[in-house]
Image (cartoon, rainbow, N blue to C red):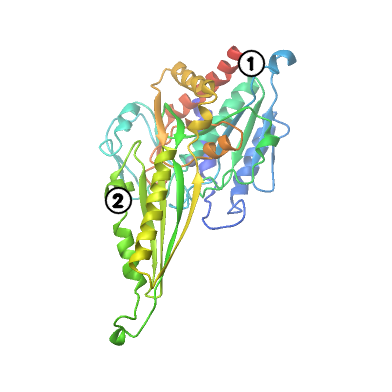
Amino acid sequence: MSSEVVERFLRYVKIHTTSQEGVDEIPSTKRQFDLAYVLAKELQELGINDAFVDEHCYVKGTLPSNLPQDQASKIPVICLLAHMDTSPEEPGENINPQIVKNYSGEDIILSGNPKLVISPKETPALMKFIGSDIITTDGTTLLGGDDKAGIASIMTVLSNITKDSNIKHGRIKIIFTPDEEVGHGVDALDVKSLDADVGYTLDGDEMGVLETETFNAAGGLITVKGFNFHPGYAKNKLVNSVKIIGEIISEFPNQEAPETTEKRQGYYHVYEVKGGVNESTLKFILRDFDEGELDFKIQFIKHIVEKYQKIYPKSTILLDLKKQYKNMKSILDQYPHIAQHAEEAIKRSGIELIRKEVRGGTDGARLSFMGLPTPNIFAGAMNFHSKKEFVPVIAMEKSIETLLNLIQIYVENFG
Ligand SMILES: [Zn+2]
């Protein structure tokens, strides 16, 4: 099992699948098809005969149940998902993975960039993996464990199941998605046609993690229109939108910013300012686990805009604000068994369960609101979107064990 998942992982990360921001098509980069076709072919070789790649680069397949029809029909159809793309924030081509055998607890120096060190001081969880083999980059690229560890895990599970008729299971759907890292991973997915009852994304990081909460999110643009004049003769005439934008930014609470918050705290974040005297724009996002608190943050922004419009009647201040995604907790709470079964599956693997919230969005959150309740389970890689990304081999093995347990738990509870 160990050698198979490692072999698969090393093969998948070498296929360049970086996605790209700001592209109106799905997939955002054609190169993602390279991995999609490999996976569809391998699924077929495992006997998943309907596996195919659709025009938007989704890999889809179905493993029929190996139980008698009357028993199989009672078991919820589980959909396992992982994403094929890697983050455009770091290079994802020519990935040259390094294997640290039998990790000793020391700093790991990355051979292609000796200034980069993966250290237990910075990543204390490393100490849990003393004695395991650890796969890192060579320091020049990201690794792609996010989320090819998830893909390798799902593929190895399917390989196990299809080779061993003693492993009884219900119907299982498999979906590998493009463009998760650029926020469009499920845009072109027809959830109804999937015909699944519950989803699990294998896109969590540290071994043992189960995530059932995401932020509620809103974001927008404030545009301030000023009026330019020759600065030597501008008294009482010039309206400087740059300065007004500066005053508006100063209203964003410093104690509720990404750099000052963690865990369950929400934030206001200004992330782009552009402009000149005539017109300046400011882009921002708002995040909170509590929907009421998010609404409060939205009202706060509206209030600031009104305030500065009153102070500067000669300027025009426009606000374009939209809600972006919602905390999936409200959906998952309606089906408590979905998270409970995942908890049980993790515990049966003999590892510590780590419940945490996603300080961002996930494909699972969007799927949950599209009708497929989908929490997120660890795939084992850590330090996502970084040249310091790594994955302990034991974490991938435990992810496989967890999935096999989960499939078993559904048979026990429903079959
Ligand atoms: Zn991911």
Residue that sits furthest to the left in the current view: 121
Q: Would you place residue 161 above or below residue 94 in this image?
A: above
Pinpoint residue 122: horizontal percent, then vertical percent: 28, 39
Pinpoint residue 284: horizontal percent, then vertical percent: 41, 55
Q: Secondary structure at mark 1?
A: loop
Q: Which residue is mark 1?
A: 168
Of mark 1 and mark 2, the one earlier in the sequence is 1
Let me know if residue 70 appears in the view. yes
Q: Separation of disc 1 and disc 2 at Cα?
A: 54 Å
Check disc 2: other Cα within 10 Å, few if <14, some if 14-19, many if 20+: few
Q: Which residue is mark 2?
A: 253
- Residue drawn at x 73%, y 32% is 49
- Residue drawn at x 34%, y 81% is 237
Q: Secondary structure at mark 2?
A: loop
Pinpoint residue 64: horizontal percent, then vertical percent: 70, 24
Q: Are marks 1 and 2 in contact (CB under 8 Å)?
A: no
- Residue drawn at x 48%, y 18% is 344
In the foreground, 211 or 399: 211
Q: Would you place residue 190 above or below residue 132 in this image?
A: below
Q: Would you place residue 408 above or below residue 288 in this image?
A: above
Instruction: Say whether residue 401 is left or right of residue 284.
Output: right
Let me know if residue 8 appears in the view. no
Check disc 1: other Cα within 10 Å, few if <14, some if 14-19, many if 20+: some
Which amino acid lies under the numbered mark 1 shown in the image of this protein? Answer: Lys
Which amino acid lies under the numbered mark 2 shown in the image of this protein? Answer: Pro
Ligand 1 under 8 Å from disc 2 Cβ: no
